Amino acid sequence: ETGVTQSPTHLIKTRGQQVTLRCSSQSGHNTVSWYQQALGQGPQFIFQYYREEENGRGNFPPRFSGLQFPNYSSELNVNALELDDSALYLCASSSRTELYEQYFGPGTRLTVT
Amino acid sequence: GNSVTQMEGPVTLSEEAFLTINCTYTATGYPSLFWYVQYPGEGLQLLLKATKADDKGSNKGFEATYRKETTSFHLEKGSVQVSDSAVYFCALTPKNSGNTPLVFGKGTRLSVIA
């Protein structure tokens, strides 16, 4: 069974740039959620994707957007990067029969300078 | 709204000491409750869960009981090891939510010294 994988591991961007983060869900999981974890804080829900559509969104501006592909993998896109976007971005996958159990990837550490 | 409050860390214990990390929650209805652990440089791992009142979740010697009357889900372990050093997050999922986002506490850092 393959776990949740994310790429890249680390990323450094400049304020104003755009970034794309990628996530492959665990085998058998069709739902992907994205979270932002600022340093010293708990993860904050960004949005969730199911059947290639956004299925819920947290309190994040529209410059945070996403995609889900037919193989259930997902992308998180952030436009017009701000310094406060520096964080660990976590992807989590779950199955529709076990919605309450989310399995997390190792995360992508984004630094905005 | 939904929220989770954890005891502030860091918590430093000697090996074989007893561990308690307090967690209380606010939620509409009866949420599912979770403890996640984050080891240095890694993502989150599900440690244990409870989906209804009085359920006890347990894993790797850790336990937590879903207490509806006190809206609590305290994490306990009878004898900690150095390898338990990590950040522990209490979380909930509102069951009336179709998109099941996890709501996390701020985390409690545990350091166990030999």
Image (tube, coloured by chain):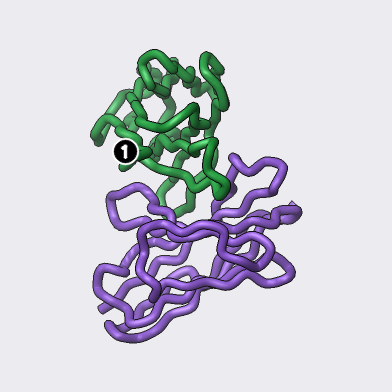
Chain A, colour shown: purple
Q: Please state the horizontal and vertical placement of residue B12, each as a whole percent of the image.
A: 27, 30
Left or right position of A52 against B52: right
Question: Would residue B13 be visible to someone looking at this image?
Answer: yes
Q: Please state which of residues B81 and A80 is positioned toward the viewer in this rendering.
A: A80
Residue B46 position (above or below residue B31): below
Query: As rendered, which of B79 and B75 lies closer to the eye?
Result: B75
Q: Quadrant of residue B14?
A: top left
Q: Residue at 46% x, 36% y: name it.
A: B92
How dense is the environment of label 1, judged by Cα within 10 Å: few (below 14), some, or many (20 and up)? Answer: many
Left or right of B29 in this view: B52:
right
Residue at x 39% of width, y 42% of height:
B104
Secondary structure under tag 1 reads strand
> Residue B64: x, y in percent?
47, 21
**In the image, residue B84 lies at what x, y percent?**
43, 33
Hey, what amino acid is under mark 1? Arg
Question: Which chain is displayed in green in the rendered image?
Answer: B
Label tally: 1
From this view, report whether residue A17 is shown above or below residue B49: below
Q: Dot 1 corresponds to which residue? A: B109
Residue A90 visible, this angle = no
Whether residue A83 sits left or right of residue B107 in the image: it is: left
Q: Chain of mark 1?
A: B
Comparing A67 with A27, the one in front is A67
The residue at 49%/31% (across/down) is: B31
**Rendered-image quadrant of the N terminus of chain B:** top left
* Position of B11 relative to A90 (above/below): above
- Give the percent coordinates (x, y) of residue A41: 30, 49
For this view, does A93 lie left or right of residue A29? left
